Image (tube, rainbow, N blue to C red):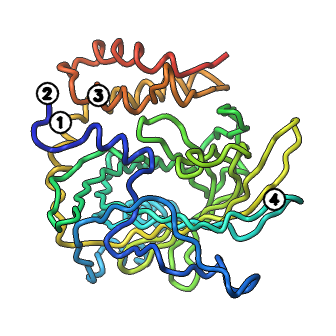
Amino acid sequence: MTDRGPIKRLPALLCLLAGLLGAGPTLYAATPYVFSHGFDNASEKAQTPRGGTTRGAPVELDDTVPAAYHDIQAPGLDKRERDARAIRALAGDYRATFEFIETAALAPGIERDARPYRSWATERVFVIADTPTEIELQHIMVMRFVDDEGAISDPMVMKHWRQRWQWQPATIWRYTGDRLWRKAALSDREASARWKQTVYQVDDSLRYEALGRWHYDDGVASWRSERFGRPLPRREASVRDDYDVLTGRHTITHAPHGWLHEQSARKISEADGQPTALAQEIGLVRYRRIGNTDFDPAEAYWPETDAFWAAVRRYWDRTMAVHDRLVIRTTVDDTPLFARLFDAAQTTQTDDPDALADTLAAIIAPYIDSR
């Protein structure tokens, strides 16, 4: 692995992850929001969305229906294979739009935060592992920005989040607050005909695990999770410190031209050890297929760094296999783990597994407390 040349990644990508870049070319700050204003106080102005002000390069929507969409509904499939096809069909080239808003305050003295959140990305989703009981998808962002003069920037490439799907898992990690995850055993009945979705941060550390079933009601493929908890996302951690856990349910739904990730959540404070719901929010992430965006930088980046990130995944997998409790720190010496790993992915000169393991142990271990 060597320095990657002209494609820009750091420090601009660190700003991107911090939530400083957000609004896409068709997201306008003045757009009213359905749940924001109008009924409580008709004279009140709509809140300006938070999430950033950058503009992205224009994209062309792909209105073809991929074969993978039709393959989900092929006759004669057993449930596991039909589900697996639905998971594989999440791969592709997308414009992702992220929208969240609080819908109600749930505790006395709490005022609803009416500011909607909006963000965007253009990304390619790869299948990086595929076995009968486990499928893994890697998201790689390729972002191009438009400046005030209308010029389009060079592409910025970043390894984004990862999702691993496991059929009828034996265990699940549950988030309990204060950066602590605990492993729990699942009975055969709990795991039967279900898939566990594990979502990993950009540094491949655990974000959350959720158990759910794929359904095919009315000819629509959708995965519906059970209730689960997770730490504050970056969009919240950067502006809120009054709650500890985001709990809720997720639904992933296939559409002819992409897929939807719907989120319904409550913001739980655990002050004095007493769980209290402060507010509830809804979120909708739309993955819309696009056809004219050049994702060659992603195709170049992933093979060049694959050995490094595979070693990172092995480190985390081993850690999670041998421990039942993990505290994962957000920063060490005021530096987030993703910043150190992104830098190492660019500069590490070896693909030797043992050498990479030593390098990664030195980088990652300070961020973990497994006692």
Q: Are marks 4 and 2 in contact (CB under 8 Å)?
A: no
Tell me where residue 28 sits by quadrant. bottom left
CA separation in Å, label 3 and label 4 = 41 Å
Task: Inspect the image, locate mark 2, and give the three-letter code of the amino acid beneath it.
Answer: Thr
Residue 343 is marked as 3
Q: Is residue 316 left or right of residue 236?
A: left
Amino acid type at mark 4: Ile
The residue sitting at 15% across, 44% down in the picture is: 7
Q: Which residue is mark 2?
A: 2
In the rendered image, residue 204, in percent from the top left (x then y), is placed at 44, 36
Per the image, label 4 sits on a secondary structure element best described as loop
Q: Is residue 21 above or below residue 288?
A: above
- Say which quadrant the C terminus sits in: top right
Labels 3, 4: front one: 4
Of marks 3 and 4, which one's residue comes earlier in the chain? Answer: 4
Q: Position of residue 261 (x, y in %)?
A: 51, 66
The disc, 2 or 1, on the residue closer to the chain's N-terminal end is 2
Q: Nearer the viewer, mark 2 or mark 3?
A: 3
- Decide which of 336, 250 is in the foreground and name it: 336
N-terminal of the two: label 2 or label 3?
2
Query: Mark 1 vs mark 3: which is more N-terminal?
Result: 1
Residue 156: which disc?
Answer: none
Identify the residue under disc 1: 304
Where is residue 175 shown, x and y percent of the image? 68, 40
Label 2 to label 1: alpha-carbon separation? 8 Å
| Residue depicted at 32% across the width and 56% down the height | 125
Which numbered dot is residue 110?
A: 4
Q: Earlier in the sequence, mark 4 or mark 2?
A: 2
